[in-house]
Amino acid sequence: MSADREARLEVIALAGLPEVRAGDDLASLIGDALGGAAGLLPLREDDVIVVTQKVVSKAEGAVVDLTTVEPRPEAVDFATRWDRDPRQVEVVLREARRIVRMANGVLITETPHGFVCANGGVDASNVGPDSGSIVTLLPADPDASATRIRGALRTRFGMDVPVVISDSFGRPWRWGIVDVAIGISGLAPLDDLRGIADADGRIMRSTVRAVADELASAAELALGKTAGRPVALIRGAVFQRAEASIREALIPAGNDLFR
Amino acid sequence: MSADREARLEVIALAGLPEVRAGDDLASLIGDALGGAAGLLPLREDDVIVVTQKVVSKAEGAVVDLTTVEPRPEAVDFATRWDRDPRQVEVVLREARRIVRMANGVLITETPHGFVCANGGVDASNVGPDSGSIVTLLPADPDASATRIRGALRTRFGMDVPVVISDSFGRPWRWGIVDVAIGISGLAPLDDLRGIADADGRIMRSTVRAVADELASAAELALGKTAGRPVALIRGAVFQRAEASIREALIPAGNDLFR
């Protein structure tokens, strides 16, 4: 792209997805929503589909009924002190590969996937009606979840569109949550510009754009948290196609200054 | 917004901005670029302007010529060990209110504004032609920078459009950089949904959307790093208007688990 004309990117939060339940064919529901929207088909080379974690976990049955959970004493102690549900704390500890911080009512863990996040991604909001005791876990293999959706959409629409599974993570040093990628299929999570010249012809030494995370954040801006829209189409983004894993975007514990 | 129709968001990376120099009237250049783009005017109620830090710093003269910098021994030691420019390390240390990490060649500091970021936001890329020894600092008061641009655009176009100043920050635990907000004017940096019911009528306990940061990330997706486009218009985002400061989005050191 040259700098002498505008570049445009569009984020479309899809409507028309029903409440997702365990065993639902999520890719089929997404395909129906794409087909039902005005002017989105045919899919394009520069499209990316972003699907929020909650519907993926629900469709895959990655949920726990807290009424079945017996919390360990450590979970009861922490929950009592910080006014939290001891059964949810227990689920977080069960899912954790490592506890990164457990203080001030905040429980930050490393998940089996390698994500470091609050409550190990275990979440109670937007789980479904009449589901007061249900929490969602992260999908077991979010890259595989993305690949299944990508494959089904390719079969149905004849276009290979990358898929990002997103979730809302907090960050050190800043309040608030932003959506990041927890699973990908068909695109490189990082756009590595090291060795490429900047606009002045100077070699950029340390510029690696976290494109998958920025796609997730852009989708969240259109999706929001309350409106019941779990899937976005992003049209016009610049990304690199690749067979890749979100693991490429995670800093190993040995390289990390904050773990 | 209801969930029964699509929500659309558009990110337009503006073209036509010239190389920005110290003393340039940046708001005027942005106004010209908006006017020169097809179909962007009139500005709308749901528009936000995102301006990348580099052009703000250059216009404000927030730059340092490294040939004028005498590094302290600590800067020379660190730079020698990790193959960095000791004069740039010196500038980072001068600008720092606190050193958060200085290891493995990584220098993470807290700036006078309260941002925690690599190299205190001191940056050598995309500074300008024939500027091999020039680095940019963060603007002295990025909220004020945003407010000046907002005011000038309101005067020129008769529409009060919020402005975000963005910069590229790394994150713990994940490779790559994402753009975040370092200055704002006219919008709330955080969209606090605590106490609002989710799609199932369940009260959300801990959902605070970092909207200003997500706007910055969405802009970066369209702007990129090499193409010489420093300003984006985002049309159709959902945000709260407010007279606010980016400081509201920063976790004070006393509340922070990673400082």
Image (cartoon, coloured by chain):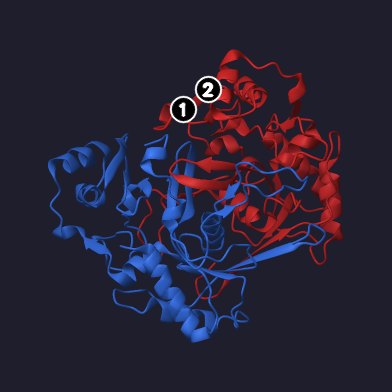
Chain colours: A blue, B red
- Please provide percent x and percent y for residue B249: 53, 39
| Structural crowding at the residue carrying mark 2, measured as other residues with C-alpha within 10 Å and reported as few (<14), some (14–19) or many (≥20) | some
Which chain's residue wears label 2? Answer: B
Task: Identify which amino acid the numbered label 2 is placed on.
Answer: Arg
| SS for dot 2 | strand
Residue at the outermost top position: B73
**Image point (19%, 43%), residue name:** A75
Pointer 2: what residue?
B98
Relative horizontal placement of residue B186, taking residue B197 as reference (left or right): right
What is the CA distance from the residue labelled 1 to the residue labelled 2? 10 Å
Question: Is there CB contact under 8 Å for labels 1 and 2?
Answer: yes
- The quarter of the image holding the N terminus of chain A is bottom right
**Image point (65%, 47%), residue name:** A195
**Image point (33%, 66%), residue name:** A57
Q: Nearer the viewer, residue B185 or A166?
A: A166
Name above or below for residue B21 compared with residue A199: above
